[in-house]
Image: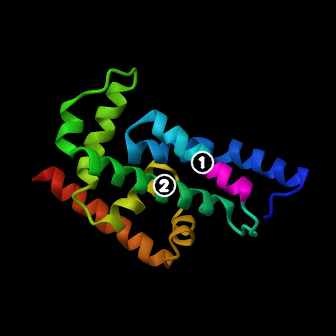
Amino acid sequence: MKLNSKSNYEHLAEWIDLWQDQLFRYAFLRLGNRSDAEDVVQEAFLKVAATTTTLTNPKAYLFRIVANRSIDILRERNRLTTLEERIAAPSASDDWEAEQEQRRIEQLLSRLPEQQSEVIRLHIHCSLKFTEIAEMLETPASTIKSRFTSGIERLKQLLIN
């Protein structure tokens, strides 16, 4: 959908109401930082507002923007510091416990192939349906379901051992 008329901007406001919280949770789980997650979500909505292309599935488009930008930020962080340094220096923010829990979850998910961990994040933490994830990742829904099932089974094995 092109965003160049008042009614189209009203659609953007509707999308913000519908998906902002899900996008934030997803970004926060990926980044472990409230401020970065808020920035990434805001950037995604600004990018949608500036687009001149027709969006057939704005929700998938927004999640893809957030996913890509989160990956960029994580790469930037990894160039600056190691994971051990980030974990060793706890945050002084009010979200310290949430950040610690996010780190524990990410440590487990990091032991899975990226394709499996991404599907688990999107399905569990963002409450996306397998069909939505499939459309977003341009992958058959059956493959998405298989990645999810395999990833969950692998997580169970990791927790048992």
Crowd band around label 2 with a 10 angstrom C-alpha radius: few (<14), some (14–19), many (20+): some
**According to the image, label 1 marks what residue?**
43
Q: In the image, which residues are magenta? A: 44-50
Q: Residue at x 50, y 70 (%)?
A: 137
Type of amino acid at the residue the image marks with label 2? Arg
**According to the image, label 2 marks what residue?**
69
Q: Is residue 149 above or below residue 33?
A: below
Residue 138, image x and y in percent?
53, 75
Residue 1, image x and y in percent?
78, 64
Q: Tell which residue pokes out farthest to the left in this image.
A: 161
Q: Is residue 127 above or below residue 154?
A: above
Q: Residue at x 27, y 46 (%)?
A: 80
Q: Tell which residue pokes out farthest to the right in this image.
A: 6
Q: Nearer the viewer, residue 94 or 36?
A: 36
Crowd band around label 1 with a 10 angstrom C-alpha radius: few (<14), some (14–19), many (20+): some
First reached walking from the N terminus: tag 1 or tag 2: 1
Q: Residue at x 39, y 26 (%)?
A: 95
Q: Please, what secondary structure does the residue beneath circle 2 have?
A: helix
Query: How is the structure coloured here?
Result: rainbow
Marks 1 and 2 in Cβ contact (< 8 Å): yes
Type of amino acid at the residue the image marks with label 1? Glu
Q: CA distance from mark 1 to mark 2?
A: 9 Å
Q: Main secondary structure of the magenta part?
A: helix
Specify the quadrant of the image occupied by residue 147.
bottom left
